[in-house]
C-alpha cells in the first residue's frame, strides 16, 4: 500500500525524500483449526508534506487502498486498515 500511496501522490506532483513517507505495518494472526491465519493488517503511515498540500494528501489517502493490487487481492480474506500521522512543513 505504501507503493500505491507514493504513486498516487507522485501522479499529483508530490515527491518525497528519505524519511518523509514511511509506514509501519503489523500483521495480526488468529489460530483457526490449530493453524495461524493472517486476519488483519494494520498500516500506519508517517508523512512529512509541503505546506498547503494537506487536501491533496488527504484525498490520496482516502482513495489509495482501493487502487492497491495487494489490498484488492486480500479483500474478503484479510481486513486491511490504515492510519496516518501527517506533519505539514511550514
Image (cartoon, grey):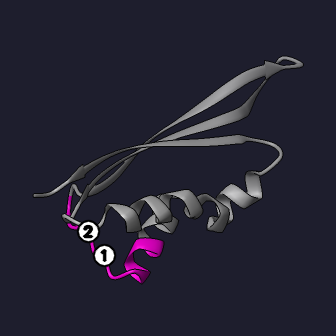
Find residue 31 and report its image quarter.
Answer: top right
Q: Is residue 28 above or below residue 58?
A: above
Number of the label disc, if any, that sits on residue 14: 1
User: Where does the magenta region start and end?
Assistant: 7-18
Give the Cα separation between the discs numbered 2 and 1.
7 Å
Q: Residue at x 56, y 63 (%)?
A: 64
Q: Residue at x 75, y 51 (%)?
A: 74
Q: Is residue 41 left or right of residue 79?
A: left
Q: Is residue 56 above or below residue 28?
A: below
Q: Residue at x 55, y 57 (%)?
A: 62
Find residue 51 and report its image quarter.
Answer: bottom left
Q: Is residue 1 left or right of residue 50?
A: right
Number of the label disc, if any, that sits on residue 46: none
Find residue 29 and report its image quarter.
Answer: top right
Would you say the residues marked 2 and 1 are in contact, meaning their CB atoms lie under 8 Å apart?
yes
55 vs 41, nearest the viewer? 55
Find out whether residue 17 is within the magenta segment.
yes
The secondary element bearing badge 2 is classed as loop
Number of the label disc, if any, that sits on residue 16: 2
Find out whether residue 46 is within the magenta segment.
no
Task: Pinpoint residue 45: horizontal percent, then vertical percent.
Answer: 39, 47
Q: Is residue 10 above or below residue 40?
A: below
Task: Pinpoint residue 1: horizontal percent, then vertical percent.
Answer: 53, 58
**Dot 2 crowding, Cα within 10 Å, few <14, some 14–19, many 20+:** some
42 vs 49, nearest the viewer? 49
Task: Pinpoint residue 35: horizontal percent, then vertical percent.
Answer: 81, 24
The secondary element bearing badge 1 is classed as loop
Q: Is residue 6 left or right of residue 68?
A: left
Task: Pinpoint residue 84: horizontal percent, then vertical percent.
Answer: 41, 44
Amino acid at each position: 500500500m505504501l507503493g500505491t500511496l507514493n504513486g498516487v501522490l507522485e501522479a499529483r506532483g508530490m515527491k518525497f525524500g528519505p524519511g518523509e513517507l514511511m509506514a509501519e505495518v503489523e500483521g495480526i494472526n488468529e489460530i483457526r483449526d490449530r493453524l495461524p491465519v493472517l486476519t488483519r493488517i494494520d498500516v500506519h503511515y508517517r508523512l512529512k508534506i509541503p505546506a498547503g498540500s494537506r487536501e491533496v494528501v488527504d484525498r490520496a489517502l482516502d482513495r489509495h487502498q482501493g487502487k492497491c493490487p495487494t489490498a484488492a487481492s486480500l479483500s474478503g480474506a484479510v481486513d486491511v486498515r490504515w492510519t496516518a500521522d501527517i506533519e505539514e512543513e511550514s
